[in-house]
Amino acid sequence: MIRQSLYAVMVIILGGIASCIDPFNPPEVLLNDTYLVYDGYINASGTDTSWVNLTRTVQLSDPNFAPKEVGATIQIENELGETFSFQPVTNKPGSYFLPPVALNLEPAYRINIKLANGRNYQSEWEYFRESPPLDSITYTRNGRDGIQIYVNTHDPNNQSKFYKWNLVETWEYISPLFSQLEVVDGLIVERQQEINRCWHSVTPTNISIFTTASLSQDVVRSFPLHYVNASSNKLLLAYSIEVTQQVLTREAFEYWSELARNNETNGSIFDPFPSQLTGNIRSLDNPQERVMGFFSGGVTQSMRRFIYAGLGRLEECSITDTLTRIEVLESDMAIVHKIEPTELYWMADHSCIDCRIWGGGTIVKPDYWP
């Protein structure tokens, strides 16, 4: 009886607490304002194209992608009075490029942006930094579960201290079923182009940064850059990772550090509250307007590593039907194989034999692929 009474009291207390909880929406979430988002890096080496992407922020509840800023005029200038103009990318709205140009690293630079609506934005003066070469890309195996990739670098002049790495991973894969035949103009013929083997490239969005400012030497040893899970099947055949290293100013490093903290916290009560990001670009028309992004540049260093881990498993796909030649010509399925010596054919869905549909890659082998 006492236990039942205590239980009833607990239910009443918990019910009262729950009834006192009201939903809270931070004021920023309810604002209708959108802000300019700058994403870019100026490559000063003279060997690579520089890219800038301009978008607008959206509300958290908005299901649409971030709007692209088209029709903008973008220039960078240095303290010597030299200017360099970006051009729009015709097939990629909101993207702008500067052809390879070797930039003098002595003077400071800033960027000027004029939107199609006439609004003007300008960054603070920034000095570009030159990265030392990468020493190596290494990895360790986590049993059969995946691999952890590391990066190693150092600056013998002890001048770099603030590092950021971008990476692109590419892997080779095959579709579950192989097809040598296809229907062309009402005839069953040998397939002219192999569609069983593909290559897929992605750019992970995680922010990889590290500083040696508190160390006695400007050395980065085995920084955990990227983990590849075996279940992704990226490691089954051949896997490649290209790492590009940037050296940042202290201010740029602090910006990316804050952005990483905002992006990677999981929202528990023990996480720090997201902070308001402050970049180095401002509106010339409205000083109170917020602008997202950080203008920076320099000379980067890149390294590629191929990994043959043999982790993962071959995907499976079932034969859908067995058809006669006449039925094949009337079918919208793909031919897997001719059953010799009969006139029957094994058939399957096109996604089972076309690796472009199966994994979203391309049948064009990259130039750098062995």
Image: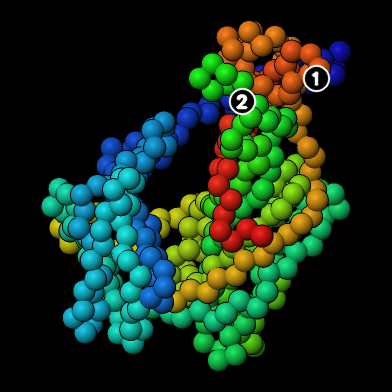
Q: Is residue 96 left or right of residue 15?
A: left
Across and down, in percent, residue 44 comes to 38, 75
Amino acid at dot 2: Val
Please tell me which of labels 2 and 1 falls first in the chain.
2
Residue 271 visible (yes or no): no
Identify which residue is drawn at 68% across, 30% down. 180
Amino acid at dot 1: Glu
The answer to which image quadrant residue 13 occupies is: top right
361 and 114: which is toward the camera: 361
**Mark 2 burial class by Cα count in 10 Å: few <14, some 14-19, many 20+:** few
**Vertical placement of residue 254 versus 133, above or below:** above
Residue 100 visible (yes or no): yes
Across and down, in percent, residue 111 comes to 26, 68
Tell me the SS state at disc 2.
Answer: strand
Q: Which residue is mark 1?
A: 340
Q: Which mark is residue 369?
A: none
Q: Which residue is mark 2?
A: 189
Q: Quadrant of the N terminus?
A: top right
Q: Is residue 318 left or right of residue 292?
A: right
- Residue extending farthest to the bottom is 157
Across and down, in percent, residue 186 comes to 54, 16
Q: Is residue 52 left or right of residue 354?
A: left
- Residue extending farthest to the left is 118
The answer to which image quadrant residue 232 occupies is: top right
154 and 99: which is toward the camera: 99
Q: Is residue 16 left or right of residue 32?
A: right
